[in-house]
Image: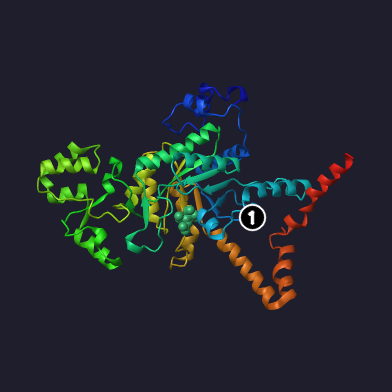
Amino acid sequence: MSDDNWLSGSAIEGWWSSPSQRDIKRPYSADTVASLRDVFPENHHSNAMALKLRDIFARVQRDKSVNLTTSVIDPVTAQVMAEAGFETLYVSGGMSANTDTATDDPGPDLLLHSRTARVNKTGKDDLPLLPIIADADSGHGQHTAIMKLVKLFVQSGVSGFHLDDLVSGVKRHDGKDGLSSVIVPTNEYLKRLAAAKLQLDIMGSEVVSIARTDAETATHITSTIDQRDRPFILGATVDMPHHYIHAEGNSGKDEWKREARLSTLDEAFKSSNPDLYEGFISQTTGLNVSEALAVAHKLAPTFYWNCESPRTTEGWYAYKGGTEAAISRANAAANIADMVWACAHSYKAEVADRFSRGVQDVRPGKWMAYNITGGFPDDGTADEEIKGIPSTLASMGYVWLFLPIGGLTAVGLGSKVAMRAIKDEGLYGYLSQVSRPAAHHADGTSPEWWWKIMGKLADDAADAIGQGV
Ligand SMILES: C[C@](O)(C(=O)O)[C@H](CC(=O)O)C(=O)O
Ligand SMILES: [Mg+2]
């Protein structure tokens, strides 16, 4: 879009009909975006990189392959990954948080590396700058907070990000108190994604948005208000003497849930009133659980189902997480995000396949991501099968496959080998395990180049200043 057209709604509409944007169905108008824009156009290097990222995904989709990457928490690893031929980088929220990389931002330093390579003519002039996909978590607040986060991402050169449907900061990894992931209603999730997209539009940004859902493993949801969540909200089918909040300890809570015979409203109605089920469904299309429950009581006055009694002390409702729930969210999100992703806690080909079909049947060609985070690969799976996972996922239509904890583990492992050698064998350990392998690396490149030649940028600047005196 030319600078003259920056504040023109029709020019924005023109941009929205371009190949990178036309798949998105915005809930707001181009004129609204024009009215929210700064007077002066913003020009971000992230746009060029975002278009590069879009090209990568389009290409792997055409080739029926998948782009594989891992997490990066420091510029050196990013550089090594570029040399090794990776095409994308993942900045993991979990790994950044675990290592406190607040001052170790890969963005600007990467640009410095690229300038250093160019000025030294290291033969790496064409060393690619890799598009970074960053973890936006839940956006860390309501919509204006999400807009601010997206703005900071764009300004710091991010090419893509994922935004999820989790409640901020309450995820448990140990399942204590029956809690795993707690998600927000579908409408809140879609608003988060729309807030992010609106900010991108305001900035004229091509950055790729990835809608992550944790519905696959969710155990709770904050509200029952959205009718799209009705098939997954659980209620007690037994009138329990006391509510779940009064059950004590992990085992007491488990026992309460068993005795309460949790079920979704529709399943509960079907099993207790099979003859009335068809009529119930036809009368409750588009209704949320409270509205549908009222209809159920009219049809069958003695019917019992209660989603209030299983609520947690935080007020969260019990939720039947799973692939169907993830598909429902992904299809809702597919309108407003460039890519969809159902976060998986472990690799299961049949789950990946079911999710893919659930999405591709509705939105053929929608970009999809897949993560392999933990429990991998030493779970007894045959090596040959593991080698085939990328092509298996590619054949299902996934375009981006990433290993969120891989980069951090690799850095830790590399440091461990080096530091152990220096500690145990002193200078010889340093020579044999660090500097010699670094200078003569098996692939012919030296991982030392970035520090050996780092000074030239500053020297050239000093020469330039000197000439002026
Ligand atoms: C992918 C993830 O968002 C990340 O930050 O890397 C995390 C990883 C983790 O918690 O182990 C996630 O899966 O939520
Ligand atoms: Mg994360």
Residue 285 lies left or right of residue 113; in this view the side is left
Q: Which residue is mark 1?
A: 84
Q: Secondary structure at mark 1?
A: helix
- Is residue 287 placed above or below 410 in the rendered structure? above
Residue 161 lies left or right of residue 111; in this view the side is left
Q: In the rendered structure, which amino acid carries the disc numbered 1?
A: Ala
Evaluate whether residue 412 shows in this view.
yes
- Residue at 23% from the left image edge and 65% from the top image edge: 255
Task: Give the total of numbered labels.
Answer: 1
- Is residue 258 placed above or below 268 in the rendered structure? below
The colour scheme used here is: rainbow
| Depth order, front residue of 222/342 | 222
Q: Residue furthest bottom?
A: 424
- Residue at 57% from the left image edge and 58% from the top image edge: 100
Residue 349 lies left or right of residue 31; in this view the side is left
Evaluate whether residue 56 shows in this view.
no
| Depth order, front residue of 387/167 | 167
Q: Quadrant of the C terminus?
A: top right
Q: Find out if the beta carbon at label 1 lies less than 8 Å from the nearest ligand 1 atom.
A: no
| Depth order, front residue of 156/447 | 156
- Is residue 445 placed above or below 49 in the rendered structure? below
* Residue 327: x %, y % from top left: 36, 46
Q: Quadrant of the N terminus?
A: top right
* Residue 88: x %, y % from top left: 58, 48
Residue 22 lies left or right of residue 176; in this view the side is right
Q: Residues within 10 Å of mark 1 (few under 14, many from 20)?
A: few
* Residue 195: x %, y % from top left: 45, 37
* Residue 205: x %, y % from top left: 55, 35
